[in-house]
């Protein structure tokens, strides 16, 4: 499934149904979503809510003593609407340019 915005497309490699929407909201994350910007730039972004990100960081610190993941975006809750708002801002404010340098 694809969601088209102004100068971008969010590409999901799977179908989106009500169950999926409930799952990502309750899990608090969705990883590696492909964003195509201006038909020429592709970037993968992982979206987290703040509670889930803290859990991930704590788990990694307990196991490996460090945490790193490129292109993380924290949103209020992991919903299609919040992802869309975040991507619109990432594109309109050219934040993606900083993500590409990683």
Image (cartoon, rainbow, N blue to C red):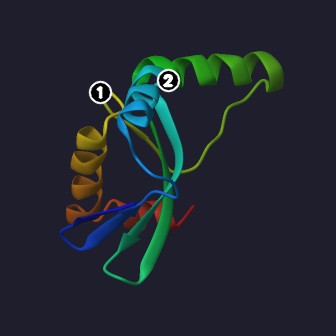
Q: Residue at x 22, y 54 (%)?
A: 89
In front: label 2 or label 1: 2
Give whichever of discs 2 and 1 has the lower sequence position: 2
Q: Is residue 48 left or right of residue 6?
A: right
Residue named by callout 1: 76
Residue placed at 62% from the left, 43% from the top? 69
Residue most toward the right?
64
Q: Nearer the viewer, residue 42 or 101?
A: 42
Q: Nearer the viewer, residue 97 or 85?
A: 85
| Residue at disc 2, secondary structure | helix
Q: Residue at x 29, y 54 (%)?
A: 87
**Measured Cα–Cα span from mark 2 to mark 1:** 13 Å
| Residue 62 horizontal/vertical position (percent) | 76, 15
Is the residue 4 above or below the residue 72 in the image? Answer: below
Which residue is depicted at the point 41% across and 84% down?
A: 40
Q: Relative to 5, does residue 87 appear above or below in the rendering?
A: above
Q: Is residue 48 left or right of residue 91?
A: right
Find residue 9 and name its label.
none
> Which image quadrant: the N terminus?
bottom left
Secondary structure at badge 1 equals loop
Report whether 5 appears left or right of 53. Answer: left
Q: Residue furthest bottom?
A: 40
Q: Are marks 2 and 1 in contact (CB under 8 Å)?
A: no
Residue under label 2, please give it. Answer: 27
């Amino acid at each position: 499934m694809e969601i088209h915005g102004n100068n971008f497309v969010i590409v999901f490699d799977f179908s989106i149904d009500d169950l999926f929407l409930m799952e990502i909201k309750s899990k608090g994350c969705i990883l590696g979503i492909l964003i195509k910007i201006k038909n020429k730039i592709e970037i993968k972004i992982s979206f987290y809510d703040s509670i889930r990100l803290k859990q991930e960081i704590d788990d990694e610190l307990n196991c490996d003593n460090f945490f790193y993941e490129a292109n993380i975006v924290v949103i209020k809750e992991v919903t299609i609407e919040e992802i869309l708002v975040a991507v619109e801002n990432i594109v309109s404010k050219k934040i993606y340019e900083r993500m590409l340098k990683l």
